[in-house]
Image (spheres, rainbow, N blue to C red):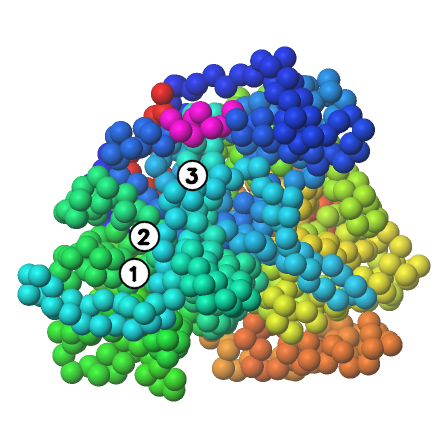
Amino acid sequence: MPHRSFTKSTPVSTITNVPKLGVNKADFIADFKRYYSHRLGRDEYCRSPYYAYEALSLVISDHLVECWKKTYNTYKEQDCKRTYYLSMEFLMGRTLSNAMLNLGITGDVAKAMYELGLDLEELVDTEPDAGLGNGGLGRLAACFIDSAATLQLPVMGYGLRYEYGMFSQEIVDGEQIEHPDHWLKNGNVWEIERPEYTQRIKFGGRVERFIDADGSQRKCWIDTSDVLAVPYDTPIPGYKNGTVNTLRLWKSTATEEFNLQDFNAGDYAEAVAEKNTAENISMVLYPNDANENGKALRLQQQYLLASASLQDIVANWVGRHGSNFTHFADKNCFQLNDTHPSVSVAELMRLLIDEHGLSWNDAWAITKKTMAYTNHTLLPEALEKWSVSLFERLLPRVLEIIFEINAHFLAEVSAHWPGDTDRLARMSLIEEAGEKQVRMAYLAIVGSYSVNGVAELHSKLLQEGLFNDFYQLWPEKFNNKTNGVTPRRWLAGCNPELASFITETIGDKWVTDLSELKKLEAFINDKKFCKKWYSLQNNAKQALVDYSKKEYDINLNVNALFDIQVKRFHEYKRQLLNVLHVIHLYDRIKRGDTENWTNRCVLIGGKAAPGYYMAKRIIKLINNISQVLSSDPDVGDKLSLVFLPNYRVSAMEKICPAADLSEQISTAGKEASGTGNMKFMMNGALTIGTLDGANIEIREEVGADNFFLFGLTEDEVEKLRPDYNPTEIINQDDDLKRVMKLLECGHFNQFEPGIFNDVINSIKSSNDPWMTIADFRSFIDMQKQVEVAYQDTERWTRMSIMNTANSGKFSTDRTIQNYNDEIWGLEPVVIK
Ligand code: HTW
């Protein structure tokens, strides 16, 4: 592990210097009224709660600004080392409720709003999600910056300000329809535009050599078509600690002179079109989670993020130290969220060499000491590669630098393994077979001092498999940082009743030290405590019942076992395995095999990448089965399958408190970590899962008795793969045979012949990479065990308590502490 010198950080709970952020109710109400009537121009006849939300947000914003400035100035005065989290995605969700929670004023504000005849919850629910991410990777970035602020660490997020976030999903005739998510249409009260920090970004053009005044060979990148990157800042408050960090998102715009030039030439339309091209860059989030891609616009987005952020930081450095970069690496650290911002490695080299005159060696030493890379997937199709010709056209100077990095690197490989030409070809930053491509993960590894995976198994597989050559060369670079989720949003915020009960029982230290939850274990034999726990779980289920009714006109039976799988649709996540189980239960009902039946409500939600055919067909299948079940009187309350449309952060805040059972059923070795699994566990759900990603660590923490394990292990999956024969497995299993027959006879697509053939064939193929059929039997058997446990309410309740009690490890406070201890080495900064 890369150890760098630093002092252990102060644990959050011992930081006592908490500025009082109390609100004087009269002032608060006056502020609210002023914004509502004077800034927004609304009166008591305005029926929409949205403007009340906006007015309230403006008041809360005001309360953050003072601490925000103070934090900013304190970092500047102390000249502390800082980390920049570079990410193409920050899946922030809603801001208002989280800001009130972290300021510690939720209760007071609710009372003030009540006095005004307003329902705080209703206002909070009108806020659109900031859906600037696809799923786990983007939400992780959001949880990280919450925890960094709570740990009082000087961490800043850098990302893109997409005009359109993750599409919103509608289900029509069982199929996913995508609608553009124009989340900024009513403005965004949380952001502040900072045109004074605008950066200029180059694209295209060509590279010229020249000899500078000192007689050295230099390069310049000329005849470029530039765009501007304008930053928008959002405050990131820590939990009741006075720290307010910054998330800086870049919006692309056209340069002034471009417009002017065309305007002078009389071509107004051209000028506007040019402006559009520039503004297009940050227009829309790419909705592909771990799918292959290769679009020019996406590379432009990545470069805009890398270049704008690095120029921002370098300009700030030069403002203070001139062109002396001797201590730059002691004060700056860049954490790359997957390879998406990895062009930063070459861009930092370019800025240091071309713009600030450093030598190659000095620049490389700085780069290697400041960059750290996190990998989030082992799926080969998700590993980014960019064609050399595209790079050449868009970023010719950056490509030259990548070639030069590669030349130095291959010389090092050669020296380490003389004559091993296979290895040279394998490790080269440039893939030579077929169309030449830049391997972005290798660029990130070569340019970083730390490379981490996101769960123990994932990090191990990176070292033994995907990145083994690099691990052999630089074992000290590799390390693990198991993911987490922020307990503020994912327990205190989303489950306030359970949170209050926990606080009544063990005090409130758990909010910033989640290992405190362990103290709940002492109560698992306390009848009164268990009864209360059970009733709170039930209340949360009822709340989801009400929400589903109101929002989607879906009827759920609160007395059924809530069995929930919500996540992006991908074959490796095996929503299909879940579906096979549902069909099996249906088949049992139809055969009258219902002795000791447990009523079950299977909820599935998630988005499919718009171009992912198979994922979309699986969504259709789920909706068709749902129809068949709900219109069959034999089924009744015994079983329902419900598709929850438009799954997103704010939906998960309502869903995860209501789960009895959390489905984490990916093919072992394929889900790098998972983080939904942690949210469910924290809120007292039990997990049915494979030995994959963070499930392994969840089971370790909660104990095997409190986890429903099934399926092949990663080793077993790989061992079986060559001989995998699903047809044989089907023939030997009568339950599975009947399930497949129901599917194949068109029972769920009577008027849509053949539409599920591709789905059926995919799991029947001996080449099915996800080996769904192989895990059917153990999944079905373990689901039976789930029912046995669920029928014993007291046992289930104890298991539920054990899950929450042992979820302490999965706080991002722990994750970020690990990043800081082992990668960043920042000192916490107390804001006075
Ligand atoms: C993992 C998930 C993990 C999460 O990161 C994921 N990786 C991608 N998306 C994810 C946070 O570490 O918990 O197990 O699957 O949710 C991901 C990705 C991408 C390319 C590769 C991997 C996401 C968006 C766009 C491109």
Q: Are circles 2 and 1 on residues that touch, CB within 8 Å?
A: yes
The stretch of residues the image draws in magenta is: 63-70
Q: Position of residue 39 (x, y in %)?
A: 63, 29
Q: Of 553 and 330, which appears nearest the observer?
A: 330
Identify the main secondary structure in magenta.
helix
Q: Quadrant of the C terminus?
A: top left
Q: Residues within 10 Å of mark 1 (few under 14, many from 20)?
A: many
Residue at the spot 58% in from the left edge and 50% down from the top edge: 131
Residue 754 in sight in this render: yes
Q: Is mark 1 within 8 Å of ligand 1?
A: no
Badge 2 crowding class, 10 Å Cα cut-off, few under 14, some 14 to 19, many 20 or more, is many
> Is residue 64 highlighted in magenta?
yes
Residue 251 lies left or right of residue 37; in this view the side is left
Count of marks placed on residues: 3
| Mark 3, residue position | 246
The residue sitting at 66% across, 53% down in the picture is: 647
Amino acid found under the numbered disc labelled 1 = Glu
* Marks 3 and 2, how far apart at CA: 16 Å
Q: Would residue 234 be found to the left or right of residue 408 on screen?
A: right
Q: Is mark 2 within 8 Å of ligand 1?
A: no
Residue beneath the point at 78% across and 25% down: 44
User: Would you place residue 90 above or below residue 523 in this image?
Assistant: below
| Left/right of residue 616 with respect to residue 724 in the rendered view | right
Q: Which residue position is annotated with label 1?
A: 347
Q: Residue 491's spot in the image, x, y percent?
A: 58, 36
Find the residue positioned furthest to the right: 633
SS class, disc 3: strand
Q: Secondary structure at mark 2?
A: helix
